[in-house]
Amino acid sequence: MSLFTKVFSARKISQGFTLVELIIVIIVIGILASVGVAQYAGVVRRAKNSEAKSVLGAMRRSQMAYKAEHEAYVIVATCTGLDITIPVSDYFTYTCHTAGGLVKAAAKTDTGLSNISLAIDGTWGTFE
């Protein structure tokens, strides 16, 4: 009889995992899940801000075109008169201001997002 068969015939081969092994796997999965959820929340927040910046950029370009045609910026807060349709957002309220073609995206309450503004010269900012 070979050494290999002697070792394994004398030892009982277990069937399954021990409780300690299962607990360790559960802990590792929990740690990985918590890191993943935190990363996902950051990505979602950046995507929402990117959406607002995209809309503000389109509003700014439309304000510039409106001024070229009418020699003044749109002075209505609802931005009526612009050649774009401002989307309804679950996260932001978009407005135009008389102060030199400034366009703003005010974050709706309980979204955890910040207010974003874009001046006609292309300067990004935030406001309260």
Image: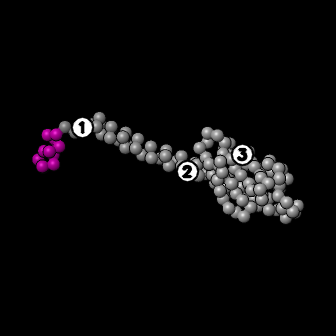
Q: Earlier in the sequence, mark 3 or mark 1?
A: 1
What range is drawn magenta here? 1-11
The quadrant in which residue 110 appears is top right
73 sits left or right of 26 in the view: right
Tell me, yes or no, if residue 117 can be seen here.
yes
As rendered, which of 9 and 118 lies closer to the eye?
Answer: 118
Residue type highlighted by circle 3: Thr
The local crowd at label 2, few if under 14, some if 14 to 19, many if 20 or more residues have their Cα within 10 Å, is few
Residue at x 36%, y 40% (from the top left corner):
27
Q: CA distance from mark 2 to mark 1?
A: 45 Å
Residue type highlighted by circle 1: Ser
The local crowd at label 1, few if under 14, some if 14 to 19, many if 20 or more residues have their Cα within 10 Å, is few
Give x and y (percent) for residue 37. Answer: 49, 44
Q: Which marked residue is nearer to the observer: mark 3 or mark 1?
A: 3
Q: Which marked residue is nearer to the observer: mark 2 or mark 3?
A: 3
Name the residue carrying label 3. 93
The quadrant in which residue 69 appears is bottom right
Q: Secondary structure at mark 2?
A: helix
Residue 14 is tagged as 1
Q: Which marked residue is nearer to the observer: mark 2 or mark 1?
A: 2
As rendered, which of 108 and 14 lies closer to the eye?
Answer: 108
Q: Secondary structure at mark 3?
A: strand
Name the residue carrying label 2. 43
Tell me, yes or no, if residue 55 can be seen here.
no
Residue at x 22%, y 39% (from the top left corner):
13
Residue at x 28%, y 37% (from the top left corner):
20
Give x and y (percent) for residue 5. Answer: 15, 46
Q: Earlier in the sequence, mark 2 or mark 3?
A: 2
Q: Are marks 3 and 1 in contact (CB under 8 Å)?
A: no
Q: CA distance from mark 3 to mark 1?
A: 63 Å
